[in-house]
Image (cartoon, rainbow, N blue to C red):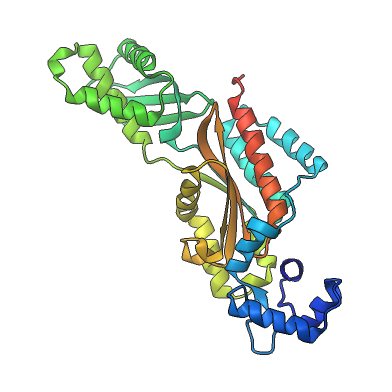
Amino acid sequence: MIRGHILTGQPVGSRSLSRGIGLDLSPAAIRSTMADLETRGLLTHPHTSAGRVPTDLAYRLYVDHLMERPRMEAHHAQVIDEALLRTRNEIPELLAEASRQLSHFSKQVGVVSAPEIRRIVVEHLEFVRLDARRVVAVLVGRSGLVHNRILDAAEPREQAELDRIGRYLSEKFHGKTLLETRQILLERMAEETAAYDRLVSRSLELGRRALEANASSAEVFVEGASHLLDEPEFADLDRMKGLLRTLEEKNHLIDLLSRVLEEQGMHVVIGRENPVANLAECSLVASTYGSGGQVLGAVGIVGPKRMEYARAIALVEHLARVLTGLLSQPRE
């Protein structure tokens, strides 16, 4: 039943089901069984005379207990590996390529969230003087991610002093996440300021401002929204407009993928399990990726509820594994 609906996108009737399942059951017996499943909330029908379609609950049962074992095709895995390897040293390009590969092989929407700034492990911090009143804060994460922010200096800073501040902060916070670093900075600034010399006080203040400037940064790479135009579920123009608007604005996707980051591993969010109203007819298959045991972001596929879940899960698992491997390697 579910396989038939996944392949056609159309309601499945008892007669077509009796011909396709290979069981010696009459259409009447199948109709009776389907009626019972509808009573249990597993099937519904869009029109009085139409066949049935699976509910969100039925898809959940299918994914959790009945689906075939996810398996990645070796040729597809090789193509993906080679594409990501070509961009491994440019993090934004690597994540954008991952979203393209997800979309290409799933024929759905590929989404990849960039690492949340608070999860990044500090490799070093440095500050570059632009002019007397402006400074560029450069944060380099252990995985090779680089974040730049322009800060307005409260008073003039010479490059030699900025170099000392960068060395001091790098030494103190190397190996800590930005969340840990920011908390320590705030605690130390709350202590008796007389206990610190001028360099330390300036270092703490500049470090705090650099981290605050980065704290709200978030980005998600989205590829392949046009694939949804071919799906019968989204033939309704208003529904399609709402879905495309959600994908374009991205903030809902960032929030949704942030929920995935709270737990490592694979997540499948089906239909109305999704908190975003415009995605109620969609499912999300997503997994976390990281570096050195640290969760950094998430990769996923957004598509109609009748997506091929086993194929999507295998694809997402592979992308997450490859990204983790590449980000865990030393940068060139």
Rendered-image quadrant of the N terminus: bottom right
23 vs 191, nearest the viewer: 23
In the picture, which quadrant includes the C terminus?
Answer: top right
**Residue lying at 76% horizontally and 81% vertically, measured from the top left:** 30
From this view, report whether residue 271 is shown above or below residue 20: above
- In the rendered view, tell whether residue 303 sits above or below residue 92: below
Q: In this rendering, does residue 152 appear at all?
A: no
Q: Position of residue 307 (x, y in %)?
A: 68, 61
Residue 199 is at least partly visible in this image? yes
Residue 197 falls in image quadrant? top left
Residue 306 in the image, given as x and y percentages of width and height: 67, 65
| Quarter of image, res 53 | bottom right
For the residue pair 171 and 317, the one nearer the viewer reads as: 317
Q: Is residue 116 above or below residue 162?
A: below
216 to the left or right of 284: left
Q: Nearer the viewer, residue 312 or 17?
A: 17
